[in-house]
Image: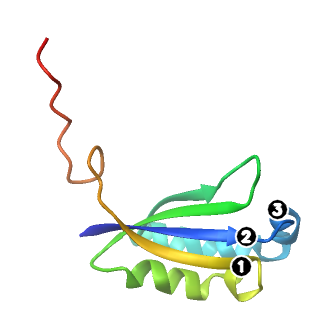
Amino acid sequence: MAYFVLFYDVVDDYVARRTPFRQEHLKLAADAHARGELLMGGAFADPANKVLVVFRGENRSVAESFARNDPYVINGLVTRWEVRPWTVVIGGADAAPPALPKP
């Protein structure tokens, strides 16, 4: 299993415009989380112009499928999205605690 990060660039008035689609978006996210695919996600603040969502799966298609079916994407709130593989060095489901240098 690998990690993948989904980045969204969103419209300037994203916070105001997402309201009609928010419940459907959150349902999509909750379902992906319940399946163990979506680990965490949320919008950046100050400014709220980007979103980051972390997925875990066999390949990037789990994140790509989420984006293609997201009402925020479908309804034009997302101006651009990108999926990137993410190499987790510390933390994560399979990681051991980091070795600390000896004093």
Q: Residues within 10 Å of mark 1 (few under 14, many from 20)?
A: few
Coordinates of residue 64 in the picture (x, y in percent): 48, 83
Q: Earlier in the sequence, mark 2 or mark 1?
A: 2
The percent position of residue 78, horizontal first and vertical second, equals 70, 77
- Quadrant of res 86: bottom left
Callout 1–callout 3 Cβ contact below 8 Å: no
Give the residue pinned by disc 3. 15
Of residues 50 and 23, the one nearer the viewer is: 50
> Residue flagged by tag 1: what amino acid is it?
Thr
Which residue is the extreme one toward the top? Answer: 103
Question: Residue 17 in the image: x percent, y percent?
Answer: 86, 71
Amino acid type of the residue tagged 3 in the rendering: Val
Q: Is residue 88 above or below residue 22?
A: above
- Name the N-terminal-most of marks 3 and 2: 2
Mark 3 Cα-neighbour bin, 10 Å: few <14, some 14–19, many ≥20:
some
Residue 75 in sight here: yes
Q: Which mark is in front, 1 or 3?
A: 1
Marks 2/1 in contact by CB < 8 Å: the verdict is yes
Q: Is residue 79 left or right of residue 41?
A: right
Give the mark toward the camera: 3 or 2.
Answer: 2
Q: Which mark is residue 79?
A: 1
> Number of numbered discs present?
3
